[in-house]
Image (cartoon, rainbow, N blue to C red):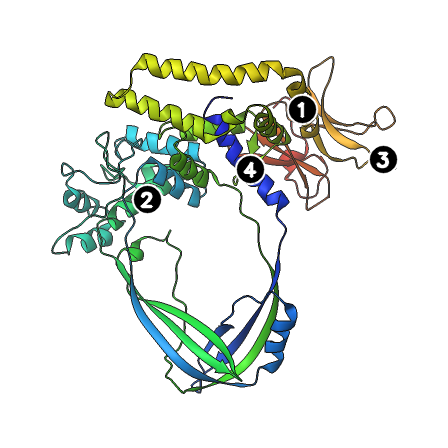
């Protein structure tokens, strides 16, 4: 692994270990269902939100009557600013929200660029330069029936003021449409990303949305409950951007002193949740924040970690091998697993561009850093080797053997004569249970069971294709016929 892949993998592994060590904390929530005299229904939650002691929550729950009184209403208007122009990182993050991996987003964007539909997709810039006539681009998009209403909304403004991000550079402008594409001329995935880019561009030229926030405090037998509502007064850019998820939350028109009927009450048992795994989009954002990689390399770094079997899925889950490698590096050479060393080197290289550093000085510093790390790794290579070998063996375990009266584990094996991979029981020769495997693609063990038959599932990853979750049982009732007798040479 390289100097950027290593700290990137460390981020994924650290998050996984955080999830595994997470101990959920129980808490309780008291909520009520309410109705006005005119029959309008809404909900409210106790002002405390979370009760850490069940007996406290039960005390409130038992105390509740069938009537409530509105104590006060607070209304405010808030602006929701339009999104900033797309740079590469923001495009990858948004691509993740429509189900695209980082590499897929970049590959499709490059195809759109090569066909003249969008600007160059590798850029840090989030501010449109004065050389780009955004009004003319909006007018051009209006010639397409798909985007005529959006174009009209932009052109109807007395003055068009584009939103601006924090990053401004002179390399390339933010990603924006450069030509109108016909839906029939693009693949389904190309159209999805093209549509996202156009909508983002249009929204950067529209005014902020306005939303009314309503907070009502309701007394129920001495206990304060809060009802939260919101509704858009002016949708503006949100009208054209379905990727923004906030929606209206209904609350009726209330007045102070109004009597409300309690139609239901709930005491909910809940637990705190662990942090979530990184999606590829989230990881790219974190890499940018820490100075790991560049706009042109971050998606490739993630793809390499996947193809080398260190991580799989989206959200990203590290293999046992990955966890062992990161633990080993933290134990023996912590500096290389931290983003600090890479960020420091990136800073020195930026200094060369600015003229603050010489190439020779930066190379000397880099060699010294890496030499120190390599000396430690060389001196402790035997211990390191054993730790990694153990993790690799654990990664070969697929699941429990389904053989009759067998307590063994199924593991990935390679036939001595044919060199073909297959799954066999580690209790061989006492147990001769075996299963065939596709011979192509990266195989990742995920320790999951098929919901149809209970047999283990493995993940097969082909470069440039969607990963395939394969139940190893050839007779699984959940399989399509075409997969029941798949060709082992595939």
Q: Earlier in the sequence, mark 4 or mark 3?
A: 4
Residue 373 drawn at (x, y percent): 52, 18
Q: Secondary structure at mark 4?
A: helix
Task: Find residue 406 and name its label.
Answer: 3
Horizontally, is 160 left or right of 115 in the view? left
Q: Position of residue 397 (x, y in %)?
A: 71, 31
Q: Identify the residue under disc 2.
A: 195
Query: At numbered mark 3, what does the secondary structure look like: helix, strand or loop?
Result: loop
Asked if the residues shown at circle 2 and circle 1 are in contact, with their CB atoms under 8 angstroms apart, the answer is no
Q: Viewed as shown, does residue 332 lie left or right of 200?
A: right
Q: Quadrant of residue 59?
A: bottom right
Rendering quarter of residue 119: top left
2 sits to left or right of 175: right
Tell me the mark number nearer the camera, choosing from 4 and 3: 4
- Residue 145 visible to an observer of this rendering: no
- The Cα atoms of the two marked residues, 2 and 4, are separated by 36 Å
Residue under pointer 1: 387
**Residues under labels 2 and 3: Cα distance?**
54 Å
Viewer-side label of 2, 3: 3
| Residue 106 in picture, x, y percent from top left | 38, 32
Local SS, label 1? helix
- Label 1 to label 3, Cα distance in Å? 28 Å
Disc 4 + disc 3, Cβ < 8 Å? no
Q: Earlier in the sequence, mark 4 or mark 1?
A: 4
The residue mark sitting in front, 1 or 3, is 1
Q: Which residue is mark 4?
A: 14
Q: What separation in Å lies between label 2 and label 1 (alpha carbons)? A: 48 Å
């Amino acid at each position: 692994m390289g100097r950027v892949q290593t700290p990137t993998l460390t981020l994924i592994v650290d998050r996984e270990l955080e999830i595994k060590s997470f101990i959920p904390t129980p808490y309780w929530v008291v909520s009520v269902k309410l109705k006005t005299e005119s029959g309008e229904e809404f909900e409210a939650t106790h002002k405390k939100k979370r009760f850490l002691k069940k007996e406290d929550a039960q005390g409130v729950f038992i105390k509740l009557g069938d009537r409530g009184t509105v104590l006060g209403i607070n209304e405010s208007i808030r602006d929701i600013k339009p999104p900033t122009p797309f740079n590469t990182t923001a495009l990858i993050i948004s691509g993740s929200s429509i189900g695209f991996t980082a590499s897929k987003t970049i590959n499709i964007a490059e195809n759109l660029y090569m066909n003249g539909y969008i600007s160059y997709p590798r850029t840090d810039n989030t501010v449109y330069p004065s050389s780009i006539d955004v009004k003319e681009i909006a007018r051009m998009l209006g010639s397409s029936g798909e985007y005529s209403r959006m174009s009209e909304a932009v052109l109807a403004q007395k003055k068009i003021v584009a939103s601006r991000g924090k990053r401004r550079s002179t390399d390339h402008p933010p990603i924006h449409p450069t030509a109108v594409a016909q839906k029939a001329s693009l693949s389904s995935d190309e159209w999805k990303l093209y549509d996202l880019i156009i909508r983002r561009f249009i929204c950067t030229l529209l005014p902020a949305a306005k939303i009314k926030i309503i907070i009502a405090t309701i007394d129920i037998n001495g206990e304060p409950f809060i009802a939260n509502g919101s509704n858009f007064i002016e949708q503006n850019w949100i009208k054209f951007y379905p990727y923004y998820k906030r929606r209206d939350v209904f609350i009726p028109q209330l007045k102070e002193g109004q009597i409300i009927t309690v139609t239901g009450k709930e005491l909910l048992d809940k637990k705190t949740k662990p942090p979530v795994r990184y999606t590829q989009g989230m990881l790219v954002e974190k890499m940018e924040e820490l100075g790991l990689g560049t706009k042109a390399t971050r998606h490739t770094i993630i793809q390499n970690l996947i193809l080398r079997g260190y991580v799989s899925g989206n959200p990203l889950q590290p293999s046992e091998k990955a966890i062992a490698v990161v633990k080993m590096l933290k134990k023996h050479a912590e500096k290389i697993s931290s983003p600090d060393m890479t960020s420091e080197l990136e800073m020195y290289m930026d200094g060369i561009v600015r003229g603050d550093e010489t190439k020779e000085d930066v190379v000397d510093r880099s060699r010294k850093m890496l030499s120190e790390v390599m000396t430690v790794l060389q001196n402790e290579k035997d211990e390191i080797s054993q730790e990694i070998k153990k993790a690799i063996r654990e990664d070969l375990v697929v699941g429990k053997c389904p053989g009759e009266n067998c307590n063994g584990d199924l593991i990935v094996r390679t036939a001595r004569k044919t060199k073909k991979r297959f799954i066999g029981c580690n209790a061989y020769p006492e147990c001769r249970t075996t299963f065939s495997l596709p011979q192509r693609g990266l195989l990742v063990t995920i320790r999951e069971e098929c919901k149809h038959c209970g047999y283990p599932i493995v993940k097969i990853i082909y470069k440039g294709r969607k990963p395939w979750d394969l139940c190893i049982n050839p007779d699984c009732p959940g399989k399509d016929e075409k997969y029941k007798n798949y060709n082992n040479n595939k």
